[in-house]
Amino acid sequence: MKAASPSPLRLAFAGMIALAVAMGIGRFVYTPILPGMMEELGLSPADAGWIASANYLGYLIGALAAIGGWAHGRERLLMLAGLAATAVLTGLMGLAGTMAAFLVIRFLAGLASAFVLVFMSSIVFGHLAATSRNDLQALHFGGVGLGIAASSALMAILVTGHAGWPAGWFWSAVISVCGFAVVALLVGSTATANGADGREPALPKDRSLMKIIVAYGLFGFGYIVTATFLVAIVRQGGGGRVFEAVVWMVTGLAGIPSVWLWQKIAGKIGLYQAYAFGCLVEVVGVTASVAVGGHIGPLLGGFLLGGTFIAITALGLQAGRQLAPQAPRRILALMTASFGLGQIIGPIVAGLLAQASGDFFLASILAAAVLLVSGAITWSAAPKSP
């Protein structure tokens, strides 16, 4: 049976393409398309925040749903269904024109992306662990940055052709369909390799695990403000359409090698310490995006955001998995749910603050403060040396 499984490298590459579609495009293509929607449809920052949060609410519900034992043995099917849904829903965004339609479509897209993340990760991680190739997790997570970079290149092309905001969604859907085909081909009939039949055991009642889950939720709030509104911040600063695409491209490109880099750092200083240090670096980027003028602020913000947020996401999941090794899918889903809750609250609070104050400065400073708290809690959760 093992002989029929694809190689670890092939599976990690499939995971990378799956996350590029579901996360890099399905989740984050909203960021570079958003300023055009705000201008052409007259959406306020608060409207934009609500649409983003509808996506993250879907993500939260999808993650919670994935905890249940009902999904055992169906991971591959559910992951592919999530990818197909991502492509369809991305295209539908270009056809919609009302707040109600945007909210429903983005909610369903969030649900789909959570299914892809949880189920694809459980397939990939299980096989990588079974073949002692955990080093390839970095390739899997690099997909988020790859999707962001691909979508920013697409937006740069569309901007030079003076295309309207719907074109961004339509072409993103086309890329998503291609990604779905590649993943289906690479994964084949591979199932999970957890080695556990049926339901996973309950999570251990552990103080460090609770801290990690809370810190992960705070991280979700802290990073998502800049990840949602960075391109809108650039537009408010009058940076120009091509510069907007460049900032988002820098974010994506910095994200591709980030998990590999931070795994190396974690190997040197420890997993929990690397998470906390990553939060500190991200604080600098989030603050720079609104506090440093000209082109430098947004570029530094994009670079440091891209260079940390995917890696911290992976480090957090790793810490959770270490503390609950017998229930890998359950902890993955619960961590994703906590993260999702932070993401729902972040854009709503940021959108309302931006509407009240006229810019994203206050919202970004609040996000930076929350990131500091997340890092501090994780630092305190580290196992004490004897």
Image: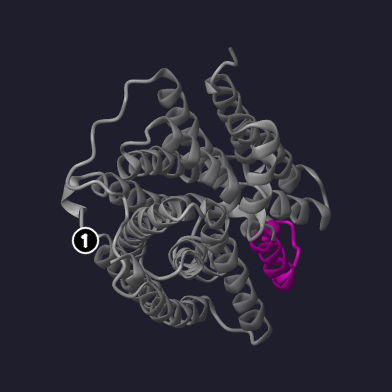
Compared to 145, does 280 lie above or below?
A: above
Compared to 280, does 294 lie above or below?
A: below
Image spot of residue 380 (x, y percent): 57, 19
Secondary structure of the residue carrying tag 1 is: loop
In the image shown, does 230 or 36 lie closer to the viewer?
230
Q: Residue at x 44, y 50 (%)?
A: 129
Residue highlighted by disc 1:
74
Q: Residue furthest bottom?
A: 161
Report which quarter residue 245 is drawn in: bottom right
> From the viewer's perspective, is 78 left or right of 49?
left
In the image shown, does 161 or 132 lie closer to the viewer?
132
Image spot of residue 359 (x, y percent): 65, 46
Q: Amino acid at mark 1?
A: Arg
Magenta-span inclusion, residue 166: no
Image spot of residue 172 (x, y percent): 48, 77
In the image shown, does 220 or 142 lie closer to the viewer?
142
> From the viewer's perspective, is 299 left or right of 200?
right
Compared to 169, does 270 lie above or below?
A: above
> From the viewer's perspective, is 292 left or right of 105?
right
- Residue 355 visible? The answer is no
Residue extent of the magenta highlight: 234-253
Q: Residue at x 37, y 33 (%)?
A: 324
